[in-house]
Amino acid sequence: MSGLPAARRTVLKGAALAGAAGVGLTACSTGSKGGASATPTAPVDLGAADAVPVGGAVLFRDQKLVVSSPAKGEYKAFSATCTHQGCVLDKVEKTEGSCPCHGSRFDVTTGKVLQGPATKPLPEVPVRATGGKLIAGPDK
């Protein structure tokens, strides 16, 4: 490209960067809309049940789940996949989960949307404590 005038090189570089940015935007908009289930289709071992504090919640980001404990021995689980564009929640503070992509916020004890752009609640996932471990998803 060194034989091209400077203005044309600038335009071509800008087009290349815009194309690369488009790839990043496409990746952001995939997720649960791409056909993958937002909830587990097989049982998922989340580890020790006592890791979830009573009155609090824990994000299991790798498993794309969030679990709360409203009372001792009781657990509620929800998908941690944002219902807006399919990004995985990145943090839970007390009982509020945050999506890093577009700022949606959810009550992780109910799945309810607290702040958009998401409009649909997080899907509930069956969860049970078995032998001191939390198992999320359907029974075998």
Image (cartoon, helix red, strand yellow):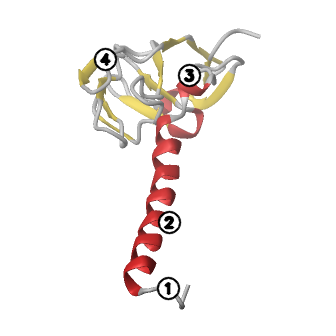
Q: Earlier in the sequence, mark 3 or mark 2?
A: 2
In the picture, the quarter occupied by the N terminus is: bottom right
Q: Are marks 3 and 4 in contact (CB under 8 Å)?
A: no
Q: Residue furthest bottom?
A: 2
The three-letter amino acid code for the residue at tag 2 is Ala
Classify mark 2: residues with Cα within 10 Å, few (<14), some (14-19) or many (20+).
few
Query: In the rendered image, which quarter is residue 101 located in?
Result: top left
Which mark lies nearer to you, 1 or 4?
A: 1
Name the residue that disc number 2 marks: 16
Tell me how far mark 4 sits from mark 2, CA to CA: 35 Å
- Helix, strand or loop at mark 2: helix
The three-letter amino acid code for the residue at tag 1 is Leu
Q: Is residue 108 left or right of residue 16?
A: left
- Helix, strand or loop at mark 4: loop
Tell me how far mark 3 sits from mark 1, CA to CA: 49 Å
- Helix, strand or loop at mark 1: loop
In the picture, the quarter occupied by the C terminus is: top right
Which mark lies nearer to you, 3 or 1?
A: 1
Tell me how far mark 1 sits from mark 4, CA to CA: 50 Å
Classify mark 1: residues with Cα within 10 Å, few (<14), some (14-19) or many (20+).
few
Q: Residue at x 28, y 19 (%)?
A: 113
Which mark lies nearer to you, 3 or 4?
A: 4
Name the residue that disc number 4 marks: 119
Q: Which x, y percent locates residue 68? A: 40, 22
Tell me how far mark 2 sits from mark 1, CA to CA: 16 Å
Q: Residue at x 48, y 18 (%)?
A: 77
Give the camera-side residue of 128 and 3.
3
Tell me how far mark 3 sits from mark 4, CA to CA: 16 Å
- Helix, strand or loop at mark 3: loop
Q: Are marks 2 and 1 in contact (CB under 8 Å)?
A: no
